[in-house]
């Protein structure tokens, strides 16, 4: 059980008395900044100079903590974040009441200062097995192999907690669920497997859905509130069949969260619509849309959006602000708009890669798909056509032999590539039907890639590790893993950046390279993808009173352009995230190193 009561000023001061002695002796805030910064520099030098008395992990922890602390204390950081950590340290040292400071704030300072001294909690799973020894040669290799076997066994035990959609018991369970829904909707097996029937029978009514799957009171009322508020919502019969009759087992938690809005989401969207609807365009696509239906953030690629709806709306979708409803009637752009967009692409020969998305373009008819893709393929400068679609997951029967042939027809080996980019969120979403759909594409030379959004519901230890393994076995290559965006309405989905970094550097690192091809990114509004693999793409500049870290993100063009605008983002407090994990039964001790990923 996570005990947050210890995260208070008295415990913090007693744990790191040296820091607060400096604070009490400081003449003013600038003097305090100087003294702590000097201490941080000295700790780095001492650690690296007397390296033989420190473990390698401690040396890195001291270095990282020192660098972060120095940056947080600067005047520029305080100005950007509109909060002074230096002043908070000063007030804590002098016993000046600070009711604005939450336990999560004290926790951040505690682990940051402990890190500065090479202390702090946490070992990752590999630490328990890959212990250095004095053996050499074949004996060393045999001993290391034994330890790797034990590490593999430990990983296997952890991933056994999660179900996949291709497990035999899952296949049987889903078959029964499918038959139950099919009979209730009066459909034959042939109709069920027809994507047009799936679209005609998208479920939007909470009462009807509750007759077909067990819903909690909160889920049902949230659906009703979403419909009453005219929020885009809908579930395909296929996707509904992926939900379990025993939700308390927790296997389908991520699936439900993907499409059923939370009450907080509905309330926040309603507020934002009344206040300023433009803020719902979180990615500021309006600032990067040089023509109708076009978004362009990078030199060689543009996004083309001819179809503005989907069979099913992801709750945290970055474009749901402009989608009227699931499969709304007026979603297809006019012929004139499409022709003008294609003309614009043709007039910019620097664009070699066109991503046709929306909405979900594969929810269109074959005729419209062919007509629109013909237009893109007719542009000589286009060397890659990408199709962004979630139908492989929400409606896999959409990938018919005819559609696969249409898409493959645009491939010209050595000249033009065709790729499908999908969004499989969790291994429980992946089914034999998805595998069949993927195989139809791959056998025709069409690559299939995946983009995952790293939400709370997929963030448990080794959950995404398993997801990558199953994706690869299904013929889908991991492409991007997106940090959840800092949107007010999706707070129930958000995960601290530190957790994604921890996952990438501790869990994903234990996979073979071909299974961890995904790149962890933060999508910066109006600017584009910021790569999380290295800290020089961002700076942690502050810790707010609620314990949230504040990051300054640098745009992708930082090294190739003098003109640069940065973006300030408030993250999810780590302690809040750990409390949520604790509430669903996770062993928080397995996440302790999270504090030292910046």
Image: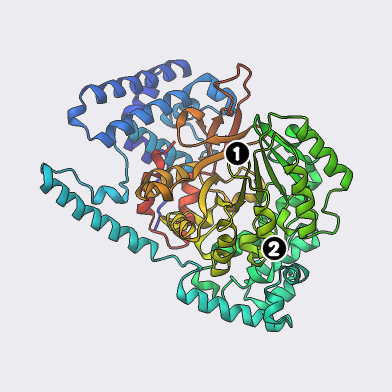
Check the picture and name the quadrant holding the C terminus. top left
Q: Look at the numbered disc 1 and give the secondary structure of its residue.
A: strand
Q: How far across and down, in percent of the image, does residue 201 sit?
A: 76, 72
Q: Where is residue 400 in the image (x, y as percent from the top left)?
A: 67, 65
Would you say residue 455 is visible in this rendering? yes
Nearest to the observer: residue 106 or residue 485 = 485
State whether residue 319 is above or below residue 149: above
Crowd class of label 2 (few under 14; some 14 to 19; many from 20; radius 10 Å): few
Q: Residue at x 18, y 43 (%)?
A: 132
- Vertical comparison of 564 with 215: above or below: above
User: Which mark is on residue 402?
Assistant: 2
Count of residue discs: 2
Task: Tell me if I can see residue 544 in this picture.
Answer: no
Residue 14 picture location, percent across and down: 33, 37
Q: Where is residue 118 in the image (x, y as percent from the top left)?
A: 29, 33
Q: How crowded is mark 1: few (under 14 residues within 10 Å), some or many (20 or more)?
A: some
Judged by depth in the image, the label closer to the viewer, 2 or 1, is 2
Residue 236, labelled with which disc?
A: none
Q: Which of marks 2 and 1 is nearer the N terminus?
A: 2
Q: Does 80 sit left or right of 350 as displayed?
A: left
**Quarter of the picture holding the N terminus:** bottom left
- Quote the CA–CA distance across marks 2 and 1: 35 Å
| Left or right side of 375 for 548 | left
Image side of residue 149 versus residue 317, left or right: left
6 relative to 261, above or below: above
Q: Which residue is drawn at 73% across and 70% down?
A: 203
Q: Is residue 214 left or right of residue 168?
A: right
Residue closest to the eye, 301 or 481: 301
Residue bearing mark 1: 523
Q: In which quarter of the image is residue 299?
A: top right
Rendering quarter of residue 8:
top left
| Disc 2 secondary structure class | helix
């Amino acid at each position: 059980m996570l005990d947050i009561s210890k995260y208070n000023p008295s415990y913090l001061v007693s744990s790191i008395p040296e820091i607060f002695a400096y604070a009490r002796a400081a003449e003013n805030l600038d003097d305090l900044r100087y003294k702590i910064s000097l201490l941080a520099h000295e700790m780095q030098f001492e650690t690296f100079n007397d390296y033989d008395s420190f473990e390698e992990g401690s040396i890195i922890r001291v270095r990282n903590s020192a660098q972060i602390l120095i940056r947080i204390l600067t005047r520029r950081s305080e100005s950007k974040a509109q909060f002074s950590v230096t002043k908070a340290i000063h007030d804590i040292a002098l016993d000046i009441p600070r009711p604005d400071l939450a336990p999560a704030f004290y926790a951040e300072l505690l682990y940051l200062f402990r890190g500065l001294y090479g202390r702090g909690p946490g070992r990752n799973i590999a630490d328990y097995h890959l212990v250095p020894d004095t053996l050499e040669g074949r004996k060393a290799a045999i001993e290391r192999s034994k330890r790797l076997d034990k590490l593999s066994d430990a990983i296997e035990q952890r991933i056994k907690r999660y179900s996949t959609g291709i497990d035999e018991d899952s296949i049987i369970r889903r078959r029964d669920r499918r038959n139950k829904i099919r009979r209730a909707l009066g459909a034959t097996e042939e109709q069920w497997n027809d994507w047009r029937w799936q679209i005609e029978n998208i479920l939007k009514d909470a009462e009807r859905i509750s007759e077909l799957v067990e819903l909690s009171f909160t889920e049902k009322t949230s659906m009703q509130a979403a419909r009453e508020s005219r929020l885009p919502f809908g579930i395909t019969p296929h996707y509904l069949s992926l939900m379990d009759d025993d939700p308390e087992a927790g296997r389908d938690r991520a699936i439900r969260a993907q499409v059923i809005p939370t009450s907080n989401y509905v309330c926040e969207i309603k507020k934002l619509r009344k206040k300023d609807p433009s803020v719902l365009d979180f990615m500021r696509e309006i600032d990067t849309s040089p023509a109708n239906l076009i978004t362009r953030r990078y030199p060689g690629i543009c996004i083309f959006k001819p179809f503005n709806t989907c069979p099913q709306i992801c709750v945290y979708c970055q474009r749901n602000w402009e989608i009227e409803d699931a499969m709304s009637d007026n979603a297809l752009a006019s012929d004139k708009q499409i022709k003008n967009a294609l003309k614009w692409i043709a007039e910019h020969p620097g664009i070699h890669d066109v991503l046709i998305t929306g909405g979900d373009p594969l929810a269109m008819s074959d005729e419209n798909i062919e007509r629109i893709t013909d237009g893109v393929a007719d542009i000589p400068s286009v060397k890659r056509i990408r199709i962004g679609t979630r139908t492989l997951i929400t409606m896999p029967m959409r990938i018919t032999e005819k559609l696969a042939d249409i898409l493959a027809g645009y491939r010209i080996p050595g000249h033009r590539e065709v790729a499908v980019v999908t969004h499989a969120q969790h291994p429980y979403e992946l089914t034999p039907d998805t595998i069949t759909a993927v195989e139809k594409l791959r056998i025709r030379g069409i690559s299939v890639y995946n983009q995952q959004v790293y939400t709370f519901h997929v963030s448990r230890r080794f959950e995404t590790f398993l997801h990558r393994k199953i994706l690869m076995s299904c013929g889908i290559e991991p492409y991007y893993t997106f940090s959840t965006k800092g949107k007010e309405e999706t707070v129930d989905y958000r995960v601290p950046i530190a957790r994604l970094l921890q996952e990438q550097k501790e869990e994903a690192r234990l996979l073979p390279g071909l299974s961890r091809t995904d790149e962890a990114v933060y999508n910066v509004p109006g600017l584009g993808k910021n790569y999380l693999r290295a800290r020089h793409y961002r700076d942690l500049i502050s810790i707010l009173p609620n314990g949230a870290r504040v990051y300054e993100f640098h745009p992708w063009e930082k090294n190739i352009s003098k003109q640069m605008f940065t973006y300030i983002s408030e993250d999810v407090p780590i302690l809040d995230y750990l409390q949520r994990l604790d509430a669903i039964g996770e062993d928080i001790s397995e996440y302790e190193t999270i504090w030292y990923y910046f």
